[in-house]
Image: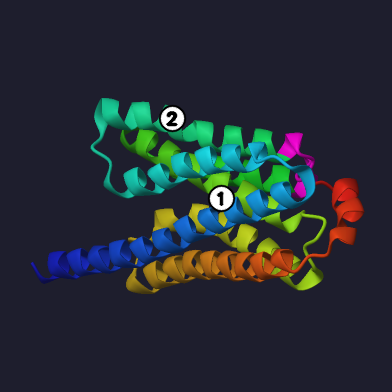
Amino acid sequence: MRLNRERITMMEFYLIAMSAGGVLTLLGIFLMWIISRDLEKKFLGSTRVSTLILVGGILTSIGFIVGESGEGGVFDAIMAILVLLGPVIIGYSLMESGVVKPTWELGLQFTLITLSLLMVSRGELNREIITLGSLLSVVLLINGLRYLGVTPGGPKILLRTASWGLVLFSWLRYMKGASMEMLIFDLAVYLLATVLWVSASIFMLVSIRELPIMAEERLNQKGL
């Protein structure tokens, strides 16, 4: 009985911490949308890419919500299909704009996150595909910000660390029930990754607002 209570307490703690991380993730998605919108308005005169990023971000946020509180069955199957559109839409918008190009590092991150599904039981596959789609979307958004031509070295390091942190989290989340220490480490990795992402995004937003017009040529050469 005591063991069950401890397990319930651990899961309650986990859900509360993940909710806090979910808020940070939503903030990161919102900041990425604002950054891409500001850059488009300032240098391209349109908002097509940022609109696609917003749509993909909404699907991503749905994935994080449903991934923790899905109803199961057909509902999860339908949501899995919808959420997987998130990384497709975000990837299309970032690659079409020239911000993100296929690299070995991005390919490796996607492969490792996808392979984490090997840890999933058949009954939980739909639910985990939902979370997988959301993780892929966030990794794309982080790399999109990292590869911006106007992103300085410091934020690039933060963003690279954040993206690899989420790759690590994609595997650690299956071990959260092993012990309280593992659960805390799992949460720490996830929260640290999202904090680094949001911090770099805030820095970039402030920098872009002060960006001189002369940066337009550099921006066009390296992508948005």
* In this view, 9 is above or below 168: below
Name the element at disc 1. helix
Q: Mark 1 packing: few (<14 Cα in 10 Å), some, or many (20+)?
A: many
Which quadrant would residue 31 be assigned to in this image?
bottom right
Residue stretch rendered in magenta on the structure: 95-105
The N terminus lies in which quarter of the figure? bottom left
* Residue shown at 28% from the left, 29% from the top: 75
Q: Which of the labelled discs sits on residue 138, or is there none?
A: 1
* Residue shown at 59% from the left, 33% from the top: 89
* In this view, 173 is above or below 60: below
Q: Is residue 165 left or right of residue 95?
A: left
Q: Amino acid at mark 2?
A: Leu
Q: Amino acid at mark 1?
A: Val
Q: Position of residue 67 (x, y in %)?
A: 36, 45
* Residue shown at 41% from the left, 58% from the top: 22
Q: Position of residue 14 (x, y in %)?
A: 32, 65
* Residue shown at 68% from the left, 66% from the top: 204
Which quadrant would residue 122 be assigned to in this image?
top left
Q: Which residue is mark 2?
A: 82
Which quadrant would residue 73 be assigned to in this image?
top left
Nearest the eye: 125 or 79: 79
